[in-house]
Image (cartoon, rainbow, N blue to C red):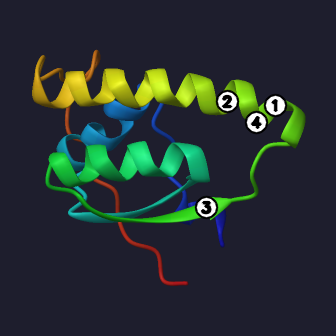
Amino acid sequence: MPAAAITCDYAGFRTLDSVIRARQVFGLDACTIVTQRYHNTRALEVARATGLDAVGFCTQDVEMRHSIRTEIREIASRTVAILDLYVWHRQPRFPGPPELIGTVDL
């Protein structure tokens, strides 16, 4: 994939911010989320809840010695994400002005 096909979100400090900003700031209607399995479930739920058509691609899982800590952390993160979306209706900390991105022919 060419570097021009990647856009960095410098204000995407957490999953909620990045996924909402993908639609509101970068003007995307659809995207592919590439992250680890444990994280993709949460990212795709945020996308679904906010109207972003997203598919997930899972990278290699973390090493076994780190996975238990990661899985426990993810339980807390998913709980907070559900509260953010459906109870607190949180928005990104730094929504920012629109920065529409172009498409790249691959």
Q: Which mark is residue 70?
A: 2
Q: Which residue is mark 4?
A: 67
User: Which of the two discs, 3 and 1, labels the residue nearer the N terminus?
Assistant: 3
Give the CA separation, mark 3 to mark 1. Answer: 17 Å
Q: Residues within 10 Å of mark 4 (few under 14, many from 20)?
A: few
Q: Of the residues tagged 3 and 1, which is closer to the observer? A: 1
Q: Which residue is mark 1?
A: 66
Are the residues flagged by discs 4 and 2 in contact, CB closer than 8 Å?
yes
- Helix, strand or loop at disc 3? strand
User: Which of the two discs, 4 and 3, labels the residue nearer the N terminus?
Assistant: 3
- Identify the amino acid type marked 3: Cys
Q: Indicate the quadrant where residue 92 lies.
A: top left
- Identify the amino acid type marked 1: His
**29 w.r.t. 96: above or below:** below
Q: Residues within 10 Å of mark 3 (few under 14, many from 20)?
A: some
- Identify the amino acid type marked 4: Ser
Give the CA separation, mark 4 to mark 3. Answer: 15 Å
Name the residue: 12% across, 17% down. Answer: 88
Q: Which mark is residue 96?
A: none
Are the residues flagged by discs 4 and 3 in contact, CB closer than 8 Å?
no
Name the residue: 66% across, 73% down. Answer: 1
Which residue occupies the foreground of this view, 66 or 47?
Answer: 66
Name the residue: 81% across, 31% down. Answer: 66
**37 w.r.t. 102: above or below:** above
Q: Indicate the quadrant where residue 70 lies.
A: top right
Residue 8 is at least partly visible in this image:
yes
Are the residues flagged by discs 3 and 1 in contact, CB closer than 8 Å?
no
